[in-house]
């Protein structure tokens, strides 16, 4: 059982930055993929970024490459999503999720555990 709690969302002007945090608790030994997803009104949930917590390998959606950075602090069991150069189209509810690693990578599907979400609103 893994519990995930997101924080750090808010409202920001286009071009601004936010850092989201995902604090994990419970048994996380096998849930070594941590992902960030987002869902905007009228759109399906999409994967944003993922990190293999055992080694730091990362994945980014094309739409956020160069702007977002996923990182981890293993001592705090926390994963971060640093979001820079935010655009209005980044507006969404952002969710943290966890799942076991699949082979040599972290897939962006079938995540087992989910946080409650944190709202990110980017205005122009």
Image (cartoon, rainbow, N blue to C red):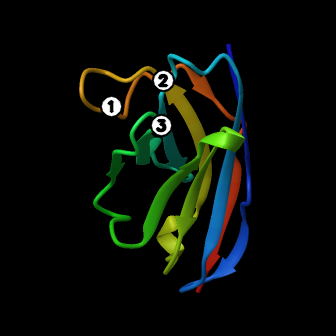
Q: Which residue is mark 3?
A: 53
Name of the residue lying farthest toward the front:
75
Q: In percent of the image, x 28 and y 60: which residue is there?
A: 62
Residue 4 position within the rendered picture, expressed as x and y whole percent measured from the top left: 70, 33
Q: Are marks 1 and 2 in contact (CB under 8 Å)?
A: yes
Total count of labels:
3
Asked if 9 appears above or below 122 in the picture, the reply is above
Q: What is the spatial separation of the Cα atoms under label 1 and label 2, in whole angstroms?
A: 9 Å
Residue 25 position within the rendered picture, expressed as x and y whole percent measured from the top left: 73, 27
Q: What is the spatial separation of the Cα atoms under label 2 and label 3, in whole angstroms?
A: 11 Å
Q: In percent of the image, x 66 and y 68: which residue is there?
A: 121
Q: In percent of the image, x 24 and y 28: which residue is there?
A: 104
Q: Say few, some or many: other residues with alpha carbon within 10 Å of mark 1 (under 14 / 14 to 19 / 20 or more).
A: some
- The answer to which of 24 and 29 lies nearer the viewer is 29
Quarter location, residue 20: bottom right
Residue 36 position within the rendered picture, expressed as x and y whole percent measured from the top left: 51, 45
- The answer to which of 33 and 38 lies nearer the viewer is 33
Quarter location, residue 15: bottom right
Q: Which residue is mark 2?
A: 99
Label for residue 107?
A: 1
Q: Tell me which numbered mark, 1 or 2, is placed earlier along the sequence.
A: 2
Q: In percent of the image, x 60 and y 83: which residue is there?
A: 16
């Amino acid at each position: 059982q893994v519990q995930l709690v997101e924080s750090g969302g808010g409202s920001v002007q286009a071009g601004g930055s936010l850092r989201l945090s995902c604090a994990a608790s419970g048994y996380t030994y096998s849930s070594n993929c941590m992902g960030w997803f987002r869902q905007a009104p009228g759109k399906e949930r999409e994967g944003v970024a993922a990190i293999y917590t055992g080694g730091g390998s990362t994945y980014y959606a094309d739409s956020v490459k160069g702007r977002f950075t996923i990182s981890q602090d293993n001592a705090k069991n926390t994963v971060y999503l640093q979001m820079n150069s935010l655009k209005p189209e980044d507006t969404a509810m952002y969710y943290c999720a966890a799942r076991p690693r699949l082979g040599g990578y972290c897939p962006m599907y079938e995540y087992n555990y989910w946080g409650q979400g944190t709202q990110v609103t980017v205005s122009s």
